[in-house]
Image (tube, rainbow, N blue to C red):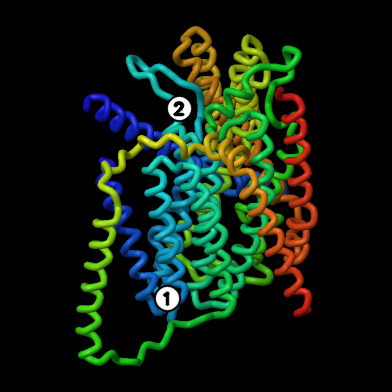
Amino acid sequence: MNFLQNFLILSLIKVAVIAFILLTTLAYLQWIERKVIGHIQLRVGPYRVGPHGLLQPLADVVKLITKEGVMPSHVNKFFYLLAPFIAVVLALISISVIPFGPEITVGPVKTWMQLTDLRIGILFVLAISSVGVYGVALGGWASNNKYSLLGGLRSSAQMISYELPLALAIAAPLLLANTLSFREMVNYQDGFWFGFIPRWNVFPEIVGFCIFVIAGFAETNRVPFDLPEAENELVAGFHTEYSSMSFAAFFMAEYANMVTVTAVATLLFLGGWQPPFPSPYSDFIPVAVFAFGGLIAVFHGLHPARRLDKFTLPAAGLVFLGIAALFGLSLFVPMLKTILMALFWFCGKVFILLFLFIWVRGTLPRFRYDQLMRFAWIVMFPLALLNLLVTGLVVALTSK
Amino acid sequence: MTPLIFLIFAGIAVFCGISLVAQTHPIASALSLIGVMGSLAVLYLQLGGEFIAAAQMIVYAGAIMVLFIFVIMLLNAGAEATSRTIPLFTRYMGMLLLAAFLGLISFIIRSMLPKTEGVEFGAFQGGTALAIGRKLFTEYLLPFEVTSVLILIAILGAIVLARREI
């Protein structure tokens, strides 16, 4: 009984921490996206609310909560209200099987930096994401609007089509590692070839990785595959008729799906929390990165381009230097080091992939619908099959 | 804990099953069916069939039912008109018959099935992906391959039928 209570309390604490971090990340991901897109288009992005627009997510949340929720006439009320709920719940569930780091010891407690490790964790994520299409499809159908309906239909067709190459691309690293658990998957990618090339799946499975990322763009309805919400044809697609918090739910679901896809890509192909260099060298990289960023911010604060930069940039620089100092301190505290190093490498890889998503949105135009379908069935699907076949052959020939 | 979870999800499965038949709108019926599949997946999971549970969600709830809903939306099928009124006599006799039928069924099940111990949750270990894969590629290799040929025939048939339309 004591164990159960301990387990329950421990799980509740972990759920609280992960939920808080995930929701904050989702809010600030949107800020990062607007900033990056802004800079790609030579604008500054959000700037007025808080220093460098840092409070913009908060302002957006307040706006969305206080807005009037409009219910269009003649909609199917039950399904209209159910759809955003389904979308956001299914988008947030997947995070429960994602591991952020190895087993850690905090005081007397030993625990994994993960909510739960299923033996079928990867299948679980696939199952949740394949059911996730209902939120979008139902929302489009229940809105009683032909643009919404077309958006919902496009999304169902697109997600079914791209799920096949996605699943086949996932199957190849599974063959290599011979496991369905994320934890064992990352453990398999531990170590280095010839002492310096990390044993990540991305090197033998570069084709699979590319297919996974491209299909991931389609699964999350992002540019260049954002046909369900193509604004020049379909107004805003499946969420045209949604306002206030139900719109926010769809919005949040999209970003949560993005985080899930990038996290899964990191775990399956990029070695999870394993550092890219052997241990003594990789330990100094977080310190160097944060110290460098802090020094740049301080430098720009001393030579301000805008009036307020005199105060905001040195403050940001000090925060960065503080983080650098924390990482430096952690080199001498083994308990802290395990947590911080794992978090740094995992979050770093996820953020690089998220940046790729935003970057692509800022640069690529949208596909036409028939091009999208042809690409899925004529290019991606056979390529993924071929990749799986070759991987299977290699594994079968080398395993004995 | 486990009997409680079983009761909750068994209840949801039965409720969704009744709702599937009782609903007049095809989308509502289809969603009820998804509810049945989801709660069945949880029951499989409790019995130790984790791979079956995941496959149930991916294949049935995630792929086949999406296609169902897709077709219902494309056809824009509306709610079924239920104007017919059932006569009072039929209604009461129907209830009686249903009760008699259920009694008969439960009697047959109780008398025919051998008395066994209750199912122990978590005792069965053969439901992992590893165990199923082993069985599938050794003991049941022939049925497995024959099924894949069967699916290939179905795909070819669909293509032939679709081409005739074009």
| Residue with the mark numbered 2 | A113
In the image, A280 versus A316, the foreground residue is A280
Residue shown at 39%/34% (left/top)?
A: A17
Judge whether residue A327 can be spotted in this image. Answer: yes
Residue type, numbered disc 2: Met
In the image, B45 versus A335, the foreground residue is B45
Residue A276 location (% of width, % of height): 67, 21
Where residue A137 sits, quadrant-wise, is: bottom right
**Callout 2: 10 Å neighbours few (<14), some, many (20+)?**
some
User: Residue placed farthest to the top in the image?
Assistant: A332
Question: Disc 2: which chain?
Answer: A
- Determine whether the residue tagged by mark 2 lies in a helix, strand or loop: strand
In the image, B108 versus B157, the foreground residue is B108
Q: Is residue A3 above or below residue B132?
A: above
| Label number found at residue A76 | 1
Q: Is residue A98 above or below residue B32?
A: above
Residue B90 location (% of width, % of height): 25, 88
Residue A371 location (% of width, % of height): 78, 62
Residue shown at 62%/14% (left/top)?
A: A284
